[in-house]
Amino acid sequence: MTSFSKDTHEFVRLLTDHQELLRSYILSQMPNVPDVRDVLQEVNVVLCEKMGDFKLGTNFGAWACTVAYYTILDHRKKMKRSGFLIFNEELCLSLAADSGEKVPAALESKRRALKLCMGKMSPANRKLIEARYESHRGGMDKVVEETGRSRGSLRVTLSRLRASLRNCIRSTIAMEGGTP
């Protein structure tokens, strides 16, 4: 069994926590959605290779998006050499500049708001939401089994809880002065 250092564990946690941010950033830069998955995988490989360059306590999202930016540029060069139509370089730089700051900041704002809103929920409702979305717990069938409630009843409850969370997140972000 391989033993990882505390720093490696923290890096892996940060990398995992930022997958949505990275995917959103890459998606904002690329016209060909099927390539997003491949580029995200390549970004993850590069980030792991450059793990030693990252200083814990600094902004992982910004660092990871910078790595993603250069990986996207490499991908575009490969696509261009293969004869695929690529946006002109000026448009690509404009997309990168526009989304480079907004995507990470918006996702981080939503993440903070979600955490705050989850904290406002009753323990029973919070546990229900967490059980539904924890992949290792087995999904909806497992929640039905654990709660003894019908699938229909759970769907209605979860739908109401998600709507409540969505509203809470929007109002929290609006109070912070952001755009939900």
Image: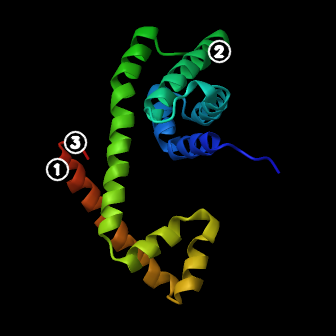
Q: Position of residue 139 (x, y in %)?
A: 59, 70
- Point out the tag, 2 or 3, that comes first from the N-terminus: 2
Q: Is residue 16 above or below residue 120?
A: above
Observer able to see residue 163: no
Mark 3 crowdedness (10 Å alpha carbons): few <14, some 14-19, many ≥20:
some
Neighbour class for label 2 at 10 Å: few (<14), some, many (≥20)? few
Any mark on residue 78, and which?
A: 2
72 with respect to 98 (left or right): right
- The kind of secondary structure element at disc 1 is helix
Determine which quarter of the picture holds residue 7.
top right
Q: Residue at x 60, y 16 (%)?
A: 74
Could you say which disc has been placed on residue 137 in the image?
Answer: none
Q: Is residue 149 above or below residue 30?
A: below
Q: Nearer the viewer, mark 1 or mark 2?
A: 1
Measured in 3D between alpha carbons, the distance from the residue under mark 2 to the one under mark 3, in whole angstroms, is 37 Å
Q: Work out whether residue 105 or residue 160 is closer to the camera in this orientation and state it.
A: 105
The alpha-carbon separation of the residues under discs 3 and 1 comes to 7 Å
- Which residue bears the numbered disc 3? 178
Q: Amino acid at mark 1?
A: Met
SS at mark 2 in the image: helix
Residue 117 lies, with reference to residue 51, above or below; the image says: below
Residue 161 percent across, percent down from the top left: 35, 71
User: First in sequence: mark 1 or mark 2?
Assistant: 2
Res 118 seen here: yes
Looking at the rendered structure, the kind of residue marked 3 is: Gly
Query: Residue at position x 75%, y 47% from top?
Result: 3
Left or right placement of residue 131 versus residue 101 in this view: right
**Left or right relative to 2: residue 73:** left
Residue under pointer 1: 175
